[in-house]
Image (tube, helix red, strand yellow):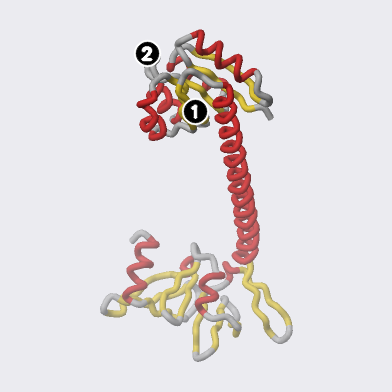
Amino acid sequence: MAIKVLIIDDDERERIVLRYIIEQIEDVKIIGEASNGIEGVMQAKEKKPDLVLLDISMPEIDGMETARRLRGLSNPPLFVFVTLHSEKAVEAFEVGALDYIVKPIEPNRIRETIDRANKRLAHEKYVDLQVEGKLRKRINLLLRNADQESITYAKLPIKERGKIILLNQEDILFAESRGKKVFVATDDNEFSTSYTLNELETRLDNTRFFRAHQAFIVNIYRAQELLPFGEGSYVINLDNHDKQIMLSRARAKVLKDKLGI
């Protein structure tokens, strides 16, 4: 694909020389010319060149300010100064110039700059493809995880007597650690599980379930009331169940924040 070039110079004779040299180089296309910085920036914004060749001494705004405005575009081009001012090289590279060519213009010097621009553009394209590939992989991973989480959040699998019971999470009242086992309770049943409470905490929907205590996870949608139990702790009474769940002082503050109370 041809590299697209925009020339910005207030001297028409210099533009003619540049145009002639560039037209002799393969895979380079001049897409526009401008006689001042303002017009050049407008053309760059519209035509989206890969490379801009610009002078420094120009009316309206000089080449340095033009370069700064080019860098501010949504898709900024590479730019190279072609100028009589050899003393401006340091400033030119500080504003991000790819190269700095001092007039009179030599064809080989322009060719070297075009080659450098091609290498830079190829590298940027490679980096963009790598980033795009990594982003695509990341997005696909997130989508797969989202699918898995939607399945996980909908059901909690529990092994019992050689079969697997799939509990709707909304039916779970609480999970309790007793001794070395963790039990999951519903309205009319209790299941012994192979989970730890920490594992359940990651599997259960955290918008519905809350770690009330070191030994309890509770479905806060089924909490009926919080009764003070002294020193900032509470007891959670559940809807249609006689189990009372301890809410430690530290966790009570977190739950209050979660509930907005």
The quadrant of the image that shows the N terminus is top right
| Element assignment for label 2 | loop
Front residue (pair 145, 12): 12
The type of residue carrying mark 1 is Phe
Around disc 1, counting alpha carbons within 10 Å, would you say few (fewer than 14), some (14 to 19), or many (20 or more)?
Answer: many
The label shown at residue 60 is 2
Q: Determine the residue positioned at 73% across, 85% down.
A: 162
Q: How many marks?
A: 2
Of labels 2 and 1, the one closer to you: 1
Around disc 2, counting alpha carbons within 10 Å, would you say few (fewer than 14), some (14 to 19), or many (20 or more)?
Answer: few
Percent across and percent down for residue 13 are 51, 8
Front residue (pair 56, 183): 56
The label shown at residue 28 is none
The residue sitting at the left extreme is 231
Mark nearer the N terminus (2 vs 1): 2
Percent across and percent down for residue 261 are 33, 61
Q: Determine the residue positioned at 47% across, 73% down.
A: 218
Percent across and percent down for residue 230 are 27, 79
Question: Where 92 falls versus 206 (above or below)?
Answer: above
The residue sitting at the bottom extreme is 179
Front residue (pair 17, 156): 17
Question: Where 61 falls versus 198 (above or below)?
Answer: above
The label shown at residue 79 is 1
| Residue 58 placement: quadrant | top left
Looking at the image, residue 203 sits to the left or right of residue 238; the answer is right
Front residue (pair 124, 149): 124
